[in-house]
Image: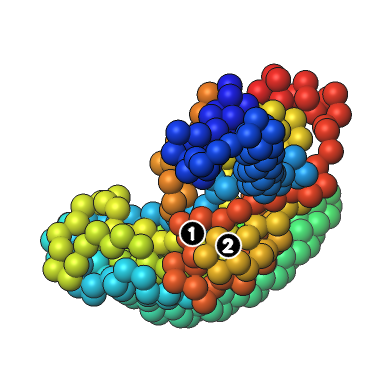
Amino acid sequence: MAQTGLTLVADTEIARLVPSPAEQPRPATVSPMSKTLWHRIAARRGQALRIAIGLSLAGAGAALYAPDLLYTSSTEAVLNARTIEIAAPIEGRVTAAPPVEGTKVAAGAALMTIENAVVDRGRLGELEATRTRTAAELAGAKQLIQSLRTQMASLEEQAAAYRRDVVARLDLAAREAAADLAAAEAGAAEADNTLSRKRTLAASGWASAADLDQADKSAARKAAEVERARLAAERHKQEAEAATRGVFVTDNNNGTPYAQQRIDEFSLRLAEAEAQVAGLTARLVQLDEQAAAERSRTERLATAELHAPVAGIVWRPNVAAGSAVGRDRQMLTLIDCSSLFVTAGFSGRQFDNLRPGARATVRVSDSGAEYAGTVVDVRAVAGNEADDHFAAPLPRLGARQVMALLKLDDPGAMASEKYCNVGRRVDVRFNDLTPAKTETRLAADVR
C-alpha cells in the first residue's frame, strides 16, 4: 500500500512537471524518429524524478525510525517528582499564611501556624485542682509528723526521768531489804542461842518445859523472819534490775508508765502519718506527670506550627491567613525536589529488557541538556496518581505499552530550575539494553 502511494505521488509530480503531448508545441513537421526520441527522454526524466522522490521519502523514514532500530527510546516521558501533602494536625484558624506557590523552602522551614482558641482545658484544670489538694494534704501530713516527733521527744524525756527516779527508789528499797535481812539474821542467831541454853538448863532441871517451848517457838519465828527478809531483798533487787531495763513491775500500769504509753501511741500515729506522706508524695508525682502530659496535649491542640519535612517547592496552597481548618485538612502540597524521576512509556516488547538497574540517558527536550538516570520500577499497568503521589500526570498507557520509572542520579542538577523542571518533556534513551534472562522474563509474566 505504501509503494502504491509513492507511485501515485511520483506520477502526479511528473504530470505536473512534464507537459502532456497535447500541450506540447508541435513542430511544423515531426518525423517518426524524432517522436520516438522525445518519448524516451520524457520517460527517463519521469523515472529519475520518481527515484529522487523515493530516496527522499526513504531518508525521512530512516531519520524518523532509525533511533528505534538502533536503541530503545521513548519520547512520551516527563520529568516528575513526588509530592508531600501537609495536613492540619489540629483544628483552628491559620494565623500565619503559607508561602505563595512556587516558593522554595528548606527542610525544617516554617510554613504556617494554626491556633485553636477554644481547646478544652477542663481535664488540665481538674488535674491541677487535684494536685493542689494533694499538696495541701501532704503539707498537713508533714506538719503532723513534725508535731508527733516533738511530743514524742518531750515524752521520752519524761519517761527517762521517771525511769531514773524509779530505779533510784527501787535501789534504796533493795538496800533497805538487805538491811532488814541482816537484822533478821541477827535475831535468828540470838534466838538459836537462847534455845540452845534453854535445852541445856532443861536437861539439868533448871528450866521448865514451858520455857523450852517458848525458846523453840522464838527461834522458829526468827528463822521465818530471816527467810521473809531474804525474799524481800531478792524481790527489790529484781524490781530494780527490771526498772533499769524500762519495765516497772511495781506500778499498776501493765509495766509501762503513762509517758511510755503515750510514746507508743504516738509512734503508731507517726508510722501512719509517714505512710500517708509516702502515698501523697507518690500521688503528687503522678499528678505532676499527668498534668505535664495534659498541658503538652493542650498546647499541641492550641497551637501548631507546621514545618517543611524536606527541601522542596510550595505547590497548591489551599488556605490563607484567617482560614478556618479542621483536623487532617490538606493545607498545601510540597514538591520534593530531593529526588527527581522520569515517568516514560515504552512499547510492551521492551518489558523484559526494561529491568530495574538499567542505565539510561535523559535529554530535556527544550534545552537539550542530558542527565544520567537509572530504572527503579517497570509497570505493565499504570498506577493511581493519588497513590503514587507524583506532581506531573503519569503517561497514559496503551494496550501494549509499559511504564518505566527512572531516578536521576543527580537531582541537584535542576534544583535552580522553576519547579525543578517537573512536567518538562524529555527523551529517554537506552544504549546498552540486552535481552533479559529467562528468570526475569518469567517474573515479568507473573506480574
What is the quadrant of the N terminus in the image?
top right
**CB atoms at circles 1 and 2 under 8 Å apart?**
yes
Tell me residue 419's x, y (percent): 44, 67
Q: Amino acid at mark 1?
A: Arg
- From this viewpoint, which residue is outermost toward the front? 29
Tag 1 residue = 424
Q: Nearer the viewer, residue 243 or 362?
A: 362
Q: Which mark is residue 55?
A: none
Q: Is residue 201 visible?
A: no
Q: Tell me the residue at 18%/60% (across/down).
A: 92
Q: Amino acid at mark 2?
A: Val
**How far apart are the two marked residues, 1 and 2, measured between alpha carbons?**
7 Å
Q: Nearer the viewer, residue 269 or 65?
A: 65
Q: Earlier in the sequence, mark 1 or mark 2?
A: 2
Circle 2 residues within 10 Å: few <14, some 14–19, many ≥20: some
Residue 112 position (above or below residue 65):
below
Tell me the element at label 1.
loop
Tell me residue 346's x, y (percent): 62, 37
Residue 169 position (above or below residue 71):
below
Question: Left or right: 153 with respect to 231?
Answer: left
Question: Left or right: 100 with respect to 439?
Answer: left
Q: Is residue 342 visible?
A: yes
Tell me the element at label 2.
strand
Q: Which mark is residue 364?
A: 2
Q: Nearer the viewer, residue 82 or 141?
A: 82
Q: Tell me the residue at 78%/25% (across/down).
A: 441
Tell me residue 192's x, y (percent): 76, 59
Tell me residue 445's x, y (percent): 70, 20
